[in-house]
Image (spheres, rainbow, N blue to C red):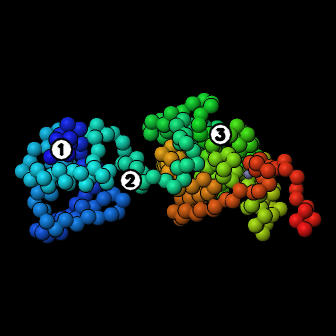
């Protein structure tokens, strides 16, 4: 009874991404957005009445349901995070993200980044600005808690320069750029904790069969590489990708934001590839041991 009274005071509604199926007269299956299902095989009419009243999100949830069953069901829904305040205005992506649960990587930061600043010019920078505005993500000109580096081409000198600035200032940074015929997002770099862009390029070069070509690409001049030209498909895709990534970071869901991962999205084949990046032990940009003397073999004997 206490919960029933509470629900009326709090003005709650059923999570919009929860659904149910009446399997038959005796069974009702409650389907949660995280993929879990609960099947009730008793008191189905009462449970159905409570669910319907909560879905309508009216302040007065009077209905014919048994008050004990109503209280127990509200208790269950509340424990599983399936009741929302009626004034909850989060969009569907935010709600689903919340349902994903707490991230194991949350400890990387005491508090996840709250503001962003965009370093970069061109179409991808404009797309990012617009989508952040739509998503109510606060943008600053400087001193933000997350740096977003955008580039309309694979201009590695610029990207590496931004990488050094962010790591030196201990500012988390996310890279987003166009490369050949795909969008590339990442790595998301947390200084002192995860691999940086320099680590990524060095490892890429070390494992490539075409090392000299990659080295030339790392030093390529502006204007020599393909440039992002936009259009409805590429612009919407780019906006969705950068917004998704920043929202997962700000939510503290580091298992979704995946620091140390480079993701490439091919818009023609709709193929997504992920390349994990390990930190270089002696990376000249991000390693904390870069100034310590190299250990000689004789030290170990
Ligand atoms: Zn590094």
Q: Residue at x 59, y 58 (%)?
A: 263
The tag earlier along the polypeptide, 3 or 1, is 1
- Which residue lies most toward the top here? 141
User: Local crowd at mark 3 within 10 Å, few (<14), some, or many (≥20)?
Assistant: some
- Which residue lies most toward the front here? 301
- Where residue 151 appears, x then y in whole percent? 65, 45
Q: Residue at x 14, y 55 (%)?
A: 69
User: Going by the image, does 149 lie left or right of 4?
Assistant: right
Respond yes or no on whether mark 1 lies under 8 Å from ligand 1.
Answer: no
Mark yes or no: residue 8 visible.
Answer: yes
Q: Nearer the viewer, residue 121 or 200?
A: 200
- Where residue 32 appears, x then y in whole percent? 30, 59
User: Local crowd at mark 1 within 10 Å, few (<14), some, or many (≥20)?
Assistant: few
Q: Residue at x 69, y 53 (%)?
A: 195
Label 3 near label 2: C-beta < 8 Å? Answer: no
Q: Quadrant of residue 59 in the image?
A: top left
Which label sits on residue 171? 3
Secondary structure of the residue carrying numbered label 1: helix
- Where residue 176 appears, x then y in whole percent? 61, 48
Label 1 near label 3: C-beta < 8 Å? Answer: no
Q: Closer to us: mark 2 or mark 1?
A: 1
Q: Quadrant of the C terminus?
A: bottom right
User: Going by the image, does 26 lie left or right of 179?
Assistant: left
In the picture of the structure, the residue carrying the numbered disc 2 is 99
Q: Is residue 259 above or below residue 147?
A: below
Q: Is residue 118 above or below residue 247?
A: above
The tag earlier along the polypeptide, 2 or 3, is 2
- Where residue 150 appears, x then y in whole percent? 62, 43
In the picture of the structure, the residue carrying the numbered disc 1 is 2
Q: Residue at x 75, y 57 (%)?
A: 280
């Amino acid at each position: 009874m206490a919960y029933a009274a509470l629900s009326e005071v709090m003005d709650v509604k059923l999570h919009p991404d929860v659904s149910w199926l009446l399997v038959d007269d005796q069974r009702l299956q409650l389907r949660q957005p995280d993929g879990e299902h609960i099947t009730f095989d008793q008191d189905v009419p009462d449970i159905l009445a409570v669910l319907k009243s909560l879905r309508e999100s009216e302040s007065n949830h009077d209905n014919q349901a048994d008050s004990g069953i109503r209280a127990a069901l509200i208790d269950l829904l509340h424990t599983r995070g399936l009741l929302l305040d009626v004034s909850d205005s989060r969009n569907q992506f935010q709600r689903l993200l919340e349902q994903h649960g707490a991230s194991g990587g949350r400890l990387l930061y005491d508090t996840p980044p709250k503001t962003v600043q965009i370093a970069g010019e061109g179409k991808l920078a404009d797309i990012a600005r617009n989508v952040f505005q739509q998503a109510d993500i606060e943008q600053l000109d400087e001193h933000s808690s997350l740096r977003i580096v955008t580039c309309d081409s694979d201009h590695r000198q610029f990207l590496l320069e931004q990488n050094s600035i962010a790591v030196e200032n201990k500012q988390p940074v996310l890279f987003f750029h166009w490369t050949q015929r795909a969008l590339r997002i990442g790595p998301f770099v947390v200084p002192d904790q995860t691999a940086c862009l320099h680590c990524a390029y060095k490892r890429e070069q070390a494992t490539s069969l075409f090392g000299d070509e990659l080295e030339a690409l790392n030093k390529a001049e502006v204007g020599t590489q393909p440039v992002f030209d936009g259009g409805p498909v590429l612009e919407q895709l780019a906006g969705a990708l950068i917004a998704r990534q920043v929202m997962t970071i700000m939510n503290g869901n580091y298992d979704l934001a995946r620091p140390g991962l480079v993701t490439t999205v091919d818009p023609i084949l709709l193929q997504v590839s992920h390349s994990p990046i390990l930190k270089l032990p002696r990376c000249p940009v991000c390693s904390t041991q870069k100034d310590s003397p190299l250990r000689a073999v004789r030290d170990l004997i």
